[in-house]
Amino acid sequence: MMLNKVPELTMWFWIIKILCTTVGESFADWINMTLGVGLENTSLIFTAVLVVVLAWQVRLGRYQPFPYWLTVVVISITGTLYTDILTDDLQVPLAVSTSVFAVVLAVVFGIWYARERTLSIHSIVTRPREAFYWLAVLVTFALGTAVGDWTLELTGWGPGVSVLLPAGLIAAVVLGWRLGASPVLSFWLAYILTRPLGANLGDWLASGTDEHGLGLGTAITSVVFLAAILATVIYLTVSRRDVIEGNQQPQHPKTSTSRTRERIMLGYLGVVAVATAVLLTWASAQPHATVTSEEGPGPAVADMTPQQATQHFPAADLASLRAITQDSLDKLKAGDQAGATARIKDLESTWDDDQSRLEALDGTAWTFLDGRIDTVLTSMRASHPDKAAEERALTALLASLA
């Protein structure tokens, strides 16, 4: 038996959990895409980091804020990357990955409960319980990523609007808990939902103002949230506001009244789930944006001729984009993959910098070209680049910019 290895569920727990989740989204995107490390290489790096920090956390005999929340941050990033590998590299549909992760989480909970007879985080006082806890946390991050991305794929909601659904569902779970729903069930539902909430919040902060975001970018968003996490951890280390005293909370026998209220609230949560499914079904049937890559959602448009795609855009902007694209293609044909990948960053930054101005001139054409550019970025930043696919994407973009 050890002292409890997890923090008490105070307001600070949920604040820092959402901060960690946002960092998981923005920091992974920054390393993978902005720095051009690649999805698989980034995943390998953070898997190794996770092994190190998890070993540190497990060796401790009690909860300590810094190693605990460092582990959560790394698991957040790693869980996000695992889902992205399934989606982007292996082309697994988000509906399938969501279902698979949900089944895996159910299995983890089932084995955990069969062995320990509790899923409460107030009783993480043995090595097996801690192992089950961290495995469940990893799967919840992967599941939350898949659920969040699938929701965006179904609805095409933008960064700002997409925050509202997980926030509303968390509020519904909190209300159910206040009215007598199972605390353990309420905790794990909220824990899963904070992943899409934090990820969507990160997208909203990082995305441009034309998308109703704040335009901070992934690097600044990551730095701001990491600083906020560090400040909160320092405060909790000094104040010990989230330390659970003793080995575990006393187990109070359930009365028949509390069991009845739990059953009623279970029905209430079922109604919330059905209402959410109806909302998503309705939203998916509406004309909406579709997610074409990790760069973000864009409205689905039909193919356009070069004249249709460029007629409203300034010649100087088009010339700059053509020059960068041609330079990348020349480097690629010369066998300079690294140089071509580095050069394509200029295309991304130039396009993003001019987005608000160009999109205002012709939103449909901008969306079409944005999809072409996203295809180029995705193909050139693949973990195992396919030269033929890269050349096709660059050539198609050049043709559209002609």
Image: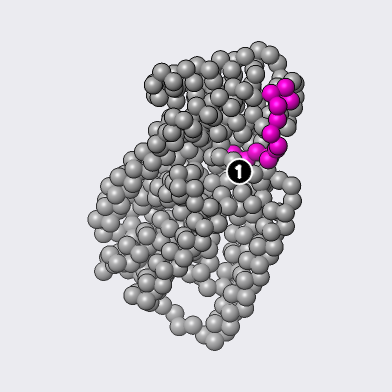
Question: Count of labels shown?
Answer: 1
Q: Secondary structure at mark 1?
A: strand
Magenta region, residue range: 296-309
Q: Answer whether residue 307 is magenta in the image.
A: yes
Query: Is residue 12 in sight in this rendering?
Result: no
Q: Quadrant of residue 181?
A: bottom right
- How many C-alpha atoms fall within 10 Å of the one at disc 1: few (<14), some, or many (≥20)? many
The image shows residue 10, relative to residue 257, as above or below, that is above
The structure residue drawn at horizontal position 33% and vertical position 75%, both measured from the top left corner, is 115
Left or right: where does residue 394 sit relative to residue 399?
left
The structure residue drawn at horizontal position 59% and vertical position 64%, both measured from the top left corner, is 173
Q: Quadrant of residue 361?
A: top right
Look at mark 1 in the image and give the residue it sits on. Answer: 291
Q: Residue furthest bottom?
A: 256
Q: Position of residue 358 (x, y in %)?
A: 69, 24
Q: Nearer the viewer, residue 197 or 390?
A: 390
Q: Position of residue 365 (x, y in %)?
A: 71, 29
Left or right: where does residue 124 sit relative to residue 219?
left
The image shows residue 246, relative to residue 299, as above or below, that is below
Left or right: where does residue 296 sit relative to residue 358?
left
Q: Answer whether residue 241 is magenta in the image.
A: no
Q: Nearer the viewer, residue 337 or 349?
A: 337
Label 1 is placed on what type of residue? Val
The structure residue drawn at horizontal position 40% and vertical position 37%, both measured from the top left corner, is 383
Q: Quadrant of the C terminus?
A: top right
The structure residue drawn at horizontal position 36% and vertical position 50%, both measured from the top left corner, is 71
Q: Quadrant of residue 271?
A: bottom right
Q: Position of residue 153 (x, y in %)?
A: 61, 49
